[in-house]
Amino acid sequence: MQSKVEERDPKSGKRKHDWQRLKHFLAALMAEGLDPRRVSAAVFVGVFIGVVPIYGFQSLAAIGLATVFRLNKPLTFGATFVNNPLLQPFLVFFSVELGHYILGGELLHLNGFQMKGLDLRREIAAWFTGSIILGILLGMIAASIAFLLVHYRSRSHTNQRSYQRDATRFVKSFFLGSPRFARGFVRWKIRLDKMFSLLLLEDLRQGSVIDLGCGYGIALALTAFQHHGRRLIGCDLDEHRVRIASQALSPLKAELSVSDVRTFEFSQASLIMILDVLQYLDSADQRALLKRCCSLLEPGGKLIFRVQDREQGVMSTLTMAFDEIIFRLSGSQSRPTALPRAEFVRVLEDAGMKVKQRLRR
């Protein structure tokens, strides 16, 4: 095994890798002044500088003003590109026309491309004067749009982060008395698995919930966060996990049992979940289980399940390979089975379901 040792400059002492330093610098630069007001100010300055004809100095002026007023430098610089080959002729034309109207009280009327008789100094003065007015107008419009977009997004993201944080605390609170490994597993699972954040974005209905292959019951607890007091039903083949989940979720209306999802008996429910379980079943059992779940959904109910998409290229191949390793470590003689996406859609639509897909990116 070879190890790489990075030499250290004795004058500078211990230092970070250049790449790490660059990443931190860029991250700090992009995060600089990203509240709605400062974003709109940066866009205004950038657009204004981009319209004013100080060619050759626009970038320097934009960065300089951003530094003086402590605005986001990449955003300010990027906004100057309003002056590009596609828009520049229009910017020049309207600047000259505005300048003529402001300085002379009338618009400039050109007969085709005839430039004879024009006073060059007067036209430059009109161009520069008009560009200032046009830069202010366009800057205000762009700044207003930027303010609204960032304000809406920041408020939406803040509310969403707060909601997810509260949901995470709610779920973890039930496992505080669980064994250390289970407690750590739940904490990292809910933090790293995107499935739980996707669940929180869904309307998880009201009424009974069934989780086939519930494991530690994390998804069940998450559904209880949206609607307290609902009946939670789950099954799993892992007796140890079911026992821990039963103890952790005892304050809730949880009914968990050790059972095979293929033979587990359950009644109608408003929400049925099958997360990372179907690949353990063969094709026929997968179709049969999905049909049974569809038939036992209440009117307006939801069936949510997660499977590997065989059509997602390299990531799908890697995930399936990881599943095979898990299968072998567990002593299973079978291999994970993933139906084509179209087959899942066909089975669900034949059962009268409306299908929505959420692809992991």
Image (tube, grey):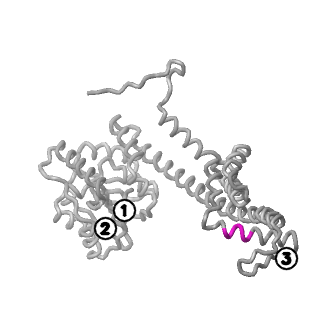
Q: Is 268 above or below relative to 169?
A: below
- Number of the front mark, 3 or 2: 3
Residue drawn at x 59%, y 43% is 29
Q: Is residue 44 magenta?
A: no
- Which one is earlier in the sequence, the residue at label 3 or at label 2? 3
Q: Residue at x 31, y 67 (%)?
A: 268
Q: Residue 106 carries which label?
A: 3
Disc ID at residue 268: 2
* Residue closest to the eye, 111 or 60: 111
Residue 189, percent from left and from top: 37, 45
Residue type pointed to by label 2:
Gln
Pick whichever, 229 or 304, lies toward us. Answer: 304
Instruction: Give the amino acid at mark 3.
Output: Glu
Residue at the disc numbered 1: 208
User: In the image, residue 187 lies at what x, y percent?
Assistant: 40, 42
Where residue 256 appears, as percent x and y from the top left, is 29, 52
Proximity of marks 2 and 1: CB atoms separated by less than 8 Å: yes
Circle 3 packing at 10 Å, graded few (<14), some (14-19), many (20+), is few
Q: 334 and 121: which one is in front?
A: 121
Mark 1 surroundings within 10 Å by alpha-carbon count, few (fewer than 14), some (14 through 19), many (20 or more) = some
How far apart marks 3 and 2 lie (CA) works out to 77 Å
> Residue extending furthest front?
116
- Count up the numbered dots: 3
